[in-house]
Image (cartoon, helix red, strand yellow):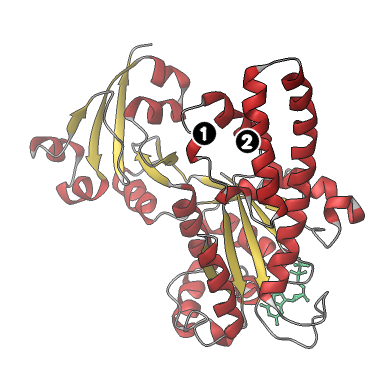
Amino acid sequence: MKLGIVGLPNVGKSTLFNSLTKAGAEMANYPFCTIDPNVGVVPVPDFRLKLLGDFYHSKKVTPAVVEFVDIAGLVKGASKGEGLGNQFLANIRECDAIVHVVRCFEDPNVIHVDGSVDPKRDIDTIDLELIFADLEVLERRISKTTKAARVGDKDAKRELEMLTELKAHLEAGKDAIVFDMEKYKDEEGIVSAFRELNLLTAKPVIYAANVAEDDLADDGASNPHVAAVRELAKEKNSEVFVISAEIEAEMSEMSDEDREMFLEDLGVKSSGLDKLIQASYRTLGLMSFLTAGEDETRAWTIKIGTKAPQAAGKIHTDFERGFIKAEVVNYKNLLDAGSYAAAREKGLVRMEGKDYVVQDGDVILFRFNV
Ligand code: GDP
C-alpha cells in the first residue's frame, strides 16, 4: 500500500511525514530504507504480531508495511507546471490513496500561503489542481478516442460518451471518485477505460486535520476548523482523523514506553500513525492475516473478501498455483489453547478449501503442491 501525503505548503506535511517514518522505523526496529528522501517505509502496527512472535519464540517478526510519499509542491497552479507541479502530480498517480493534510491550527509564527486558516478554501485549492490535472489527461484521451470513433469504431463511440460525460462532471468541480459509473457497469471495456485513466481525483482521500496539542484530547470537537473538514469529508464520503504533527514529531523521539505514557497524559488512545493506518485500511478495504512459526511470524495485507488461494499468492505465486488447502486458526484461539497441537485437538484448527474467504486475524498454514 502506497499513500501520498498532500496539502498546501506549511500545513505540516513534512513534520508529519518525518515523524511517522521515524516513529515507525524505531517501533518495529524495521530497517528504514530510504529509497528517496520523500519516500518512507513504515511498518503497520499490529499487536497480534508481538503476541504470536513470543508464543512461537520466532527468530524474526515481520510486519506488513505501508509506503508513504511526501508530495510537496502542490500549490495553486501546480497543474500548469508551475513549481515543478507536474512531477508531483505524477507521484500522486502511483499512490493507492491520498492523505490530505489540512491545517487546523492557528499559529502566527507559521505563515499560511493564503493568509489565514481556512480548511474549506485549502481543500478546494488542492482539489481544483487535481481536477485540472485530470482534465488534461481526459482531453488527451478524448482526442484519441474521437479519431477512433470517426472511423466507425463502435466501442470508441461508447467510450467517447463516457469520457464526455466525465469531462462535464469534472468541469463542474466534482471528483472522479463520485462519477456515476453504474450505467456502464456491464461494459468491461468502458470500466477498464475509466480505470486506465488513473485519475487523481478517482483515488480515495483521507483527511488529516492537523491541530494544536490542546485539541487532541477531545478529537478536535471544539475546533471549528476541524468541524469544517468533517463536513466536507462527509460530502465526499471520506474519513477524517485528527492529528497534531508537532506532537507526532515529539513522540517520534521517544521510546515505546515513554510514548505510551505521553499518550495517556494527553488523554489520547492512539498515536497518529495508528489512526492513519486504521483509516487507510478502512478506506481501501484492507485487512491482515498472519503466518506464524519458529522461523518467522509475519503479517500480510489483503483486500477484505480475498479467498485463500489468492491470499497464499501474496506470499508466493507458487502457493497460489499449487494451492491445496489452508489450515486456519484464529490467533486468539491459538494463544488461548497454549499450543498449535492443543488448538488442533480442541478442533480450533480448520481445514479450508479454495473458496474460503480469509478473515482478519486468521493464522494460516498453506498446503500446496510445488
Ligand atoms: P509542509 O510545508 O506542509 O511540509 O509543512 P512543515 O511540516 O514543514 O511545517 C511548516 C511549519 O509549521 C513548521 O515550522 C512546523 O514546525 C510548523 N507546524 C507543523 N505542524 C504544526 C502543528 O501542529 N502546530 C504548530 N503550531 N506548528 C506546526
Quarter of the image holding residue 224? bottom right
In the image, what residue occupies the spot 55% across and 66% down?
A: 233
Q: Is mark 1 in CB contact (under 8 Å) with mark 2?
A: yes
Residue 68 point in image, percent of width and height: 64, 51
Numbered disc total: 2
Q: Is residue 246 left or right of residue 46?
A: right
- Image quadrant for the C terminus? top left
Residue 339 in percent (x, y) is at 19, 42
Task: Give the percent coordinates (x, y) of residue 204.
Answer: 57, 51
For residue 74, above or below residue 361: below
For the residue pair 313 and 81, the one nearer the viewer reads as 81
Residue 184: mark: 1
Q: From the viewer's perspective, is residue 88 above or below residue 219?
A: above
Which residue is rendered at x = 61% and y = 35% of the image?
194
| Quadrant of the picture in which ligand 1 is shown | bottom right
Sequence-first disc among 1 and 2: 2
Q: Would you say 287 lies left or right of 96 here?
A: left
Quadrant location of the N terminus? top right
Residue 290 locus on image (x, y percent): 36, 41
Q: Is residue 294 visible?
A: yes
Mark 1 falls on what kind of element? helix
Q: Is residue 58 left or right of residue 39?
A: left
User: For the residue marked with disc 2, what is the amino acid?
Assistant: Met
Which element type, helix, strand or loop, lies under badge 2?
Answer: helix
Q: Which residue is mark 2?
A: 162
Q: Measuring 26% from the left and 30% from the top, which residue is drawn there?
A: 356
Regarding residue 94, the answer to whether it shows in the image is no
